[in-house]
Image (tube, rainbow, N blue to C red):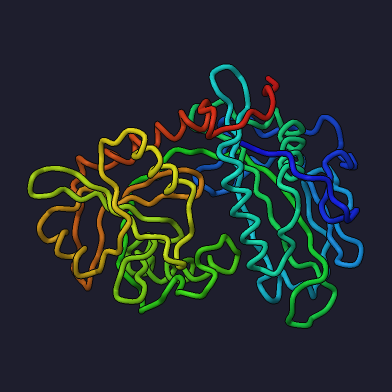
């Protein structure tokens, strides 16, 4: 659970939620209508009306947070967030449960990961987590009417920090901007998709890189690779790393469901070896398995040779992408070294849907996995 942190001896070493300056326009239209919820990350018109913005300067520290209407940011054309990739983000999902209470799913996990990403980008990572949570709480309350009522819908708040320096020098920024904006999202898994192993020998990440952090520059590797894969009729790429080992499915963690000769299932996912993001969905699935103990979960490397052999012998039941919005989606077919393998259609969402439903339940009501934010307004 969240802990209140110590008092700071440096006046502006962190921001304080009690100092929020309210510049919002009361009564703006909210985005709670179900038909306006965007699907699986594709934003349309589900943007929440209010956001929070706070600036940092190394000479004076953090300024006062501002609650304002959703809109454009004022930044200079020379900032490091644009030129040198000094940018990272983290998503926080708020769901409404059957009692009308709004609960945030695993905020501690996401805040820890956000601070690590900020540190990796040479941005400020020492802000007080409890104060950050209070900013999230204030924004949830401001956007309470935008929290969807659908069973698989949530308000996703994206916290982003960027280098906001006023120099073109390629170095650590001396000014940062933190902003948090929200939108309604749908947790419904997308239709099964086609994948290809590797794409022109491109790598999503490698040891010593930023692959295990949620930084903006990571995403261009899989976006570019997927754009190439789409020209060949595929939807995404199963990336490989050194040693011809499977790594990530697009920008998501991957789980392979293997059925042995004895008919018993086991789940295998690559280990967190410094090249893979520690996804919340992946971690949550592993914790659910640990709680129930019905299916063994192995964290180990899987080579392309092993994967192809398992596919040839019919031992792969599902290949699951663990997405960022706690969505688990299935691969319908996968191409390995020029040969395409179709996965059993009757097993689509067999395991993944079970975990998906459990994640939704935990996100709305689990006392250790979700934190109450407010009672949603009708």
Quadrant into which the N terminus falls: top right
Q: Position of residue 372 (x, y in %)?
A: 64, 28
Between 246 and 33, the one nearer to me in the picture: 246
Q: Position of residue 278 (x, y in %)?
A: 48, 55
Q: How many marks?
A: 0
Residue drawn at point x = 8 percent, y = 49 percent: 261
Q: Position of residue 195 (x, y in %)?
A: 32, 61
Q: Is residue 262 left or right of residue 245?
A: left
Residue 79's image quarter? bottom right
Q: Is residue 35 left or right of residue 329?
A: right
Residue at the top extreme, as displayed: 99
Residue drawn at point x = 76 percent, y = 55 percent: 178
Is 125 drawn above or below residue 291 in the view shown? Answer: below
Residue drawn at point x = 61 percent, y = 38 percent: 184
Q: Position of residue 260 (x, y in %)?
A: 13, 49
Residue drawn at point x = 72 percent, y = 65 percent: 123
- Is residue 338 visible to us here? yes
């Amino acid at each position: 659970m969240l802990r209140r942190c110590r008092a700071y001896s440096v006046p502006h070493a962190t921001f304080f939620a009690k100092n929020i300056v309210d510049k919002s326009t009361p009564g703006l239209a909210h985005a709670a209508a179900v038909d306006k919820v965007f699907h699986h990350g594709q934003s349309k018109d589900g943007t929440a009306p209010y956001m929070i913005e706070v600036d940092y300067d190394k000479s004076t520290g953090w300024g006062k947070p501002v609650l304002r209407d959703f809109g454009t940011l004022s930044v200079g054309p020379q900032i490091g967030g644009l030129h040198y990739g000094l940018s990272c983000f983290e998503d926080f999902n708020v769901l409404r449960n059957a009692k009308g209470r709004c609960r945030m799913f695993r905020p501690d996990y996401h805040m820890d990961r956000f601070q690590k990403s900020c540190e990796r980008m040479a941005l400020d990572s020492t802000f007080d987590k409890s104060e950050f949570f209070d900013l999230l709480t204030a924004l949830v309350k401001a956007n309470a009417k935008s929290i969807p009522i659908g069973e698989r819908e949530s308000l996703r708040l994206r916290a982003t920090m960027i280098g906001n320096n006023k120099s073109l020098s390629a170095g650590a920024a001396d000014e940062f901007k933190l902003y948090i904006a929200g939108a309604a999202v749908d947790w419904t898994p997308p239709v099964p998709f086609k994948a290809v192993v590797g794409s022109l020998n491109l790598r999503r990440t490698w040891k010593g890189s930023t692959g295990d952090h949620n930084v903006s520059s990571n995403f261009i590797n899989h976006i570019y690779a997927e754009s190439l894969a789409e020209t060949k009729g595929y939807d995404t790429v199963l990336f490989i790393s050194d040693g011809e080992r499977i790594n990530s499915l697009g920008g998501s963690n991957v789980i392979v469901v293997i059925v042995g000769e004895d008919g018993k299932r086991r789940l295998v996912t690559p280990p967190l070896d410094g090249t893979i993001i520690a996804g919340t969905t992946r971690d949550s699935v592993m914790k659910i398995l640990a709680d129930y103990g019905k299916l063994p979960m192995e964290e180990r490397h899987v080579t392309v040779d092993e994967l192809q052999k398992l596919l040839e012998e019919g031992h792969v039941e599902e290949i699951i992408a663990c997405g960022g919005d706690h969505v688990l989606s299935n691969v319908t077919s996968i191409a390995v070294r020029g040969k395409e393998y179709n996965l059993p259609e009757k097993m689509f969402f067999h395991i993944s849907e079970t975990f998906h439903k459990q994640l939704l339940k935990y996100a709305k009501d689990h006392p250790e996995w979700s934190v109450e934010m407010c009672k949603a307004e009708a």
